[in-house]
Image (spheres, rainbow, N blue to C red):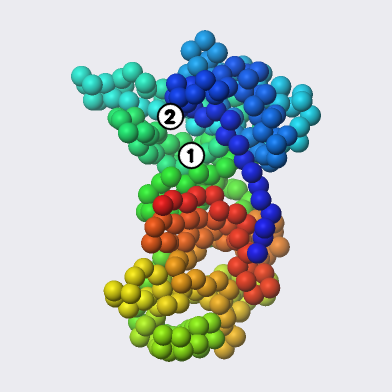
């Protein structure tokens, strides 16, 4: 298990936080000082928006970003600067003509959205993946796949890393793949969820053996008919020349016994050898799915993007498989 923690501090945000607290920083000096204070308190990264010093409202003025970033860098604190790139996508329809923009609309193109990124060259910046309802009124945030591809290509050209925030619908998850620019050096493979209610008898026999090794006869033995095979993929995760087989599987609790599972697991069959199959992750509350994989460092072993479903929510993160176990690299989205 990876116990290293990365703390990121969003200093001000873009919403009406100034109307909720007098302590929200507004000027570039105030925002920079708050970021410096957060870094000295232990934050590894600071996520920065800027505001109009006269009104306190969110701004996308490159000059305000430049002053803020220069002040943080001049302080000498060791912190990753993460600038927003989400400004300029707001659309609010006019009340008297829903086909036209109304007050609150701030809509610009992808190049303009990154003007301050090109000016400041932060270590990372946000990349909001997906068009979505914003708040509880008529405002929507527009971020279409063509916009995202253009922004990702511009980030690639400036060597600024885009941080994907997955806000799309399930049909387009993981949107990590959609935003990679053409010719990107990372080979991303999408792994759809493909339930297999019948399945291969040899596969089910191997899974029954693995379940027995994990849970024994607690609650009675798990048999092939109990298994729900959510996903079977072939991908190289341990470094052998042949692809490994990963199986997302669970055995639900009997109806009426509450939420959760008798057994839920991600099972690895190294090089596809079912006789050597073993679980690398287990739970009695969550199920797991592999959304995508990619070879980030070019060593031939693929890193994983996974989702976990929990009866009160879920999460998404990155992971590797090492020493017979799933090692999370960090969870970046969760909900309840």
The residue that appears at 41% across and 89% down in the rendered structure is 220
**Position in image of residue 46 (x %, y %):** 63, 35
* Among the two numbered marks 1 and 2 on one chain, the one whose residue lies closer to the N terminus: 2
Q: Are marks 1 and 2 in contact (CB under 8 Å)?
A: yes
Q: Is residue 108 left or right of residue 272?
A: left
Are there few (<14), some (14-19), or many (20+) residues within 10 Å of tag 1? many
Name the foreground residue: 81 vs 180: 81
- Vertical placement of 76 versus 223: above or below? above
**Position in image of residue 88 (x %, y %):** 46, 26
The residue that appears at 43% across and 36% down in the rendered structure is 143
Q: Report whether residue 202 is seen.
A: no
Q: Is residue 307 left or right of residue 114?
A: left
**Position in image of residue 327 (x %, y %):** 63, 64
Q: Quadrant of the N terminus?
A: bottom right
Q: CA separation, marks 1 and 2?
A: 10 Å
Give the residue furthest to the top. 54
The residue that appears at 54% across and 86% down in the rendered structure is 213
Disc ID at residue 5 = none
Q: Helix, strand, or loop for circle 2?
A: strand
The residue that appears at 53% across and 15% down in the rendered structure is 52
Disc ID at residue 128 = 1
Label 2 sits on residue: 89
- Vertical placement of 205 versus 84: above or below? below
**Position in image of residue 141 (x %, y %):** 39, 33
Name the foreground residue: 128 vs 38: 38
Are there few (<14), some (14-19), or many (20+) residues within 10 Å of tag 2? many
């Amino acid at each position: 298990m990876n116990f290293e923690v990365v703390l990121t501090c969003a200093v001000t945000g873009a919403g009406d936080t100034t109307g909720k607290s007098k302590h929200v920083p507004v000027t570039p000096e105030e925002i920079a000082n708050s970021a410096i204070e957060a870094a000295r308190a232990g934050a590894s990264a600071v996520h920065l928006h800027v505001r109009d010093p006269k009104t306190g409202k969110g701004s996308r003025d490159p000059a305000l970003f430049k002053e803020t970033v220069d002040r943080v860098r001049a302080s000498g604190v060791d912190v990753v600067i993460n600038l927003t790139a989400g400004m300029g996508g707001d659309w609010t329809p006019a009340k008297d003509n829903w086909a036209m923009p109304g007050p609150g609309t701030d809509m610009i193109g992808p190049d303009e959205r990154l003007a301050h990124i090109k000016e400041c060259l932060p270590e990372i910046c946000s990349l909001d993946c997906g068009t979505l309802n914003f708040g509880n009124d008529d405002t929507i945030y527009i971020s279409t796949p063509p916009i995202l591809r253009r922004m990702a290509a511009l980030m690639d050209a400036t060597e600024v890393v885009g941080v994907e925030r997955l806000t799309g619908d399930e049909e387009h998850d993981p949107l990590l793949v959609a935003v990679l620019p053409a010719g990107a050096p990372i080979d991303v493979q999408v792994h759809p969820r493909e339930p297999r209610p019948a399945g291969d008898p040899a596969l089910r026999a191997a899974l029954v053996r693995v379940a027995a090794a994990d849970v024994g006869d607690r609650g009675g033995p798990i048999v092939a008919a109990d298994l729900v095979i959510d996903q079977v993929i072939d991908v190289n995760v341990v470094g052998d020349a042949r692809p490994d087989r990963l199986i997302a599987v669970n055995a639900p609790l009997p109806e009426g016994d509450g939420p959760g599972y008798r057994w839920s697991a991600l099972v690895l069959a190294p090089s596809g050898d079912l006789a050597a199959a073993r679980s690398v992750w287990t739970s009695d509350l969550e199920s797991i799915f592999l959304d995508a994989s990619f070879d980030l460092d070019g060593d031939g072993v693929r890193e994983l993007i996974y989702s976990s479903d929990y009866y009160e929510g879920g999460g998404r993160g990155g992971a590797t498989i090492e020493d017979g176990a799933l090692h999370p690299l960090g969870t970046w989205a969760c909900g309840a």
